[in-house]
Image (cartoon, helix red, strand yellow):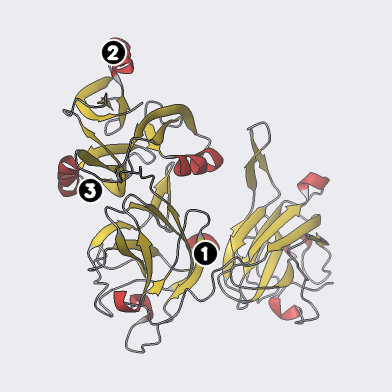
Amino acid sequence: MEPNDIIGDIIIPEGLTELDDLSSTTVFGEIGDNPDIPLTNDVDLFAVSLNAGDILVTDINAEANDSTLDSVLRVFDANGNQLIVSEDHSFIDDDGMVVDELDPFTQFTVLQDGIYYVGVSSSPNLNYNPNLPDSGEGESSGSYDLVLSRNDADIDDGLYSEPNDIISSANAVELDSTSSKRIIGEIGDDDNPDIPPTNDVDLFEVSLKIGDTLFADINAEVNGSPLDAVLTVFDVDGNRLAQNDDNSFDGVTELDPFQEFIAPQDGTYYVGVSSKSNDVDQRYDPTVENSNMGGSSGAYLLELSIDENDLTETGTTSFTTPINRFQNSDRPGTYLFAGEQESQNIREKFPNFVEEGQAFKVAVEPEDGLIRINRFQNSSVPGTYLYAGEEESQGIRANFPNFIEEGIAFYVYDGGADIGEDFYRFQNLGVPGTYIFVADEERQNIITNFPNFEEEGLAFEVEI
């Protein structure tokens, strides 16, 4: 019903658009049917009630229905702050082709209970104020179908509580390989008034066995939160073992971090969530309250999962973990090596990484006779990677800040062990700072036919 150009036009609860998790709701509307403002400046707003953890999906069908409307979708909180915006939508169809359309689509996870507003306008009316009528200018008008749906919250209640700023008060999270834990928290809600909101830290305790791979993923910016988050993994003494600030993949950098960590031994570990610090190294002490200096605050969704290790009856690790090889088609001649769980994510979300098959098998836990290989991403050439042993890694950390360490990749035999299959490292001189690792047969082919690949020697030994 018009007018509904501002949040104040919608009466709650009478004006709520009812959503359930069983089916979608379609609203039929028109940009241009408000007689009090120019046709193309019209805005339609719809109120929905959501719970923390709900996934709200919004989809416009206008161009698809031969409407003259080139639409825009925006989602606001109760105060009119924009959380998500979409103008045009790109997706991959069943034939693997990229399809671009003018009809927008959004999907995001709600981080707090409350009333939210879905705004429909015409392009390029991206900056209208949902609290002021006729506050933006559009260029088209026409009818549309707005399809709204939500999935109920799948959040682990009781895992988050304040204070949990230090290891001794960390929230315990029980993990197994059958499912992940989804936790909603907030940086800035500490109940200690002496801690500034941006200095808040949330810590979560997990128990891991040697060789377990822990996956920690933050979704804050992507869900409209102002939090610029950092993820850090600590041991039981508060020593920093791994950290990620901004996550880069396929040339795209996002403020939401992701961390993969392989436990070097049985024990208790701590996942710390904080805001990006004024100190670039984010060296807060998880045993000392208010030792952090953050620069932002806000809610976040933390997802934790593990890939449990594969031990033999004798308690030692065999090389049974397959590593797949992907070539980045955006940067031909550059490669990524990934375990199966990460490979599934790459197949689903990054079609420009072309899978070339299983490269080799490795161990995922340390033991006598094995060396650890760390993974670095070259931030100067995003989406390209270097794998290095610990000795070389120390030199990389000290001298090459553009190589961002992403944690332990796997465990292998040293190149001189004469136990496994030799793998050699080549640097692609056409894209300096990028590498490929190959067995001897492929090595000979590269030496003969690809002079732009410079051999750097025997890297490690694995099984194939």
Question: What distance separates the C-alpha of mark 1 from that of mark 2?
Answer: 48 Å
Disc 3 secondary structure class: loop
Please indicate whether residue 76 sits to the left or right of residue 65 in the image: left
Which label is found at residue 39? none
Question: Relative to residue 87, is residue 44 depicted above or below?
Answer: below
| Pointer 1 or 3: first along the chain | 1
The amino acid on which the numbered mark 1 sits, given as a three-letter code, is Arg
Q: Quadrant of residue 287?
A: bottom left
CA distance for labels 1 and 3:
33 Å
Of labels 3 and 2, the one closer to you: 2
Q: Residue at x 46, y 69 (%)?
A: 226
Give coordinates of residue 34: x percent, y percent: 82, 68
**Residue 318 higher or lower than 429, as above or below:** below
Residue at the image point whose x is 22% and y is 27% from the top: 419
Residue under label 1, please give it. Answer: 182
Dot 1 crowding, Cα within 10 Å, few <14, some 14–19, many 20+: many
Provide residue 238's location: percent of width, then percent of height: 24, 68
Amino acid on which the number 2 mark rests in the picture: Gln
Evaluate if marks 1 and 2 touch, with contact meaning CB atoms under 8 Å apart.
no
Q: Residue at x 15, y 49 (%)?
A: 398
Q: Position of residue 392 (x, y in %)?
A: 17, 40
The numbered mark, 1 or 2, whose residue comes first in the sequence reads 1
> Looking at this view, is 110 or 237 the one in front?
237
Residue for point 68% across, 35% down: 94
Give the residue pinned by disc 3: 401
Q: Position of residue 359 (x, y in %)?
A: 39, 28
- Which residue is identified by label 2? 444
- Disc 3 marks a residue whose amino acid type is Pro
**Residue 75 visible, this angle:** yes
Q: Which residue is at the front of the view, 425 or 44? A: 425
